[in-house]
Image (spheres, grey):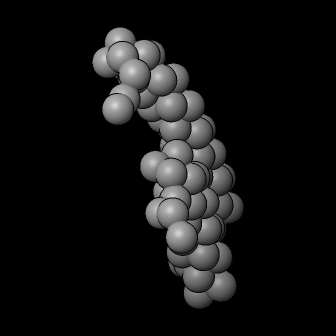
Amino acid sequence: MRPPRPAAILVIMTHYVLAQTLATVGEFEAKGFLGTVGKIAAATVIFFIAIGLVVGLLLGFFVGRSVGRRQGPRA
């Protein structure tokens, strides 16, 4: 069995980070730790983390492809 490709690992890790962030916010909300302003702030932080992870994933994918082309064919 072949190991997963690096892109697949990055997608899995991105999903894991998002799931853990949402779970943490859910726990804070259940404990009454977050008020209305806190919920808005938490949603904003989660939004920017998600956008950053997706943009980083796409940027890394395309930069990796362009660098890989310059190396030439592999043996």
Residue at the location (36% across, 29% down)? 74
- Judge from the rendering whether residue 9 lies leftward or rightward of residue 72; answer left or right: right
Residue at the location (47% across, 63% down)? 3
Give percent across and percent down for residue 9. 50, 57
The one nearer the camera, 62 or 56, is 62
Give percent across and percent down for residue 45. 54, 49
The one nearer the camera, 74 or 47, is 74
Examine the rendering and report whether any part of residue 58 can be seen.
yes
Give percent across and percent down for residue 61. 50, 31
Residue at the location (59% across, 82% down)? 27
Residue 43 lies, with reference to residue 16, above or below; the image says: above
Residue at the location (40% across, 22% down)? 73
Q: Quadrant of residue 58?
A: top right
Residue 7 lies, with reference to residue 21, above or below; the image says: above
Residue farthest to the top? Answer: 70
Q: Quadrant of residue 72?
A: top left
Examine the rendering and report whether any part of residue 18 can be seen.
no
Give percent across and percent down for residue 20. 54, 71
- Judge from the rendering whether residue 73 lies leftward or rightward of residue 26; answer left or right: left
Residue farthest to the bottom? Answer: 31
